[in-house]
Amino acid sequence: MSEENITRITLHELLEKRARGEKSLTDWARVNALTDEDIERAMRDDPDWQDFIDIDWSKAVMVIPQKKKAISIRLDEDIIDFFQQTGKGYQTRINAVLRHFISEQKRSKG
């Protein structure tokens, strides 16, 4: 999909459109008619899904963010570099790794 076909609006703008009674431009009848095979074929053709298409999502866990507590922590430079290279949100990913570690520790002791 090219950038020229993508429309971005804020939540506030969306709520304003709905309040004015504007309808969605999405062809929901076409979307609802798609079969699982159609969706999987579209995903395989989409370059944004190449790294994710064959992941086993059956063990995925929904994580509801908890309140964060600001601290100062010293980590090895290569650890920080690794996570920063993954882009924006690297601190959240460090938190997720630590949370997974805690989960595994609790599971192995339980």
Image (tube, rainbow, N blue to C red):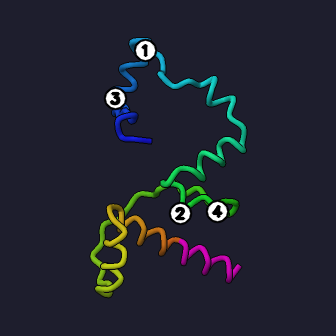
The answer to if 102 sits in the magenta stretch is yes
Mark with earlier residue (3, 2): 3
Residue sitting at x 65%, y 47%: 41
The answer to the question of whether label 3 and label 1 lie on touching residues, with beta carbons closer than 8 A, is no
* Quarter occupied by residue 9: top left
Dot 3: what SS?
helix
- Between the residue at mark 3 and the residue at mark 4, the CA separation in whole angstroms equals 36 Å
> Which one is earlier in the sequence, the residue at label 2 or at label 1?
1
Spatial CA span between label 3 and label 2? 32 Å
| Proximity of marks 2 and 1: CB atoms separated by less than 8 Å | no
Q: Amino acid at mark 2?
A: Asp
Mark 1 crowd level (few <14, some 14–19, many ≥20, 10 Å Cα): few
Find residue 13 and report its image quarter.
top left
Q: CA distance from mark 3 to mark 1?
A: 14 Å
Which residue was labeled with disc 4? 54
Q: Which is more toward the observer, 41 or 14?
A: 41
Task: Relative to 40, say whether 102 is above or below.
Answer: below
Q: As rendered, which of 84 and 7 lies closer to the eye?
A: 7
* Disc nearer the start of the sequence (4/1): 1
Residue at the image position 65 percent from the left and 60 percent from the top: 57
Q: Which residues are the magenta region?
A: 100-110
Instruction: Name the residue nearer the viewer: 26 or 3.
Output: 3
According to the picture, the residue beneath numbered tag 3 turns out to be: 12
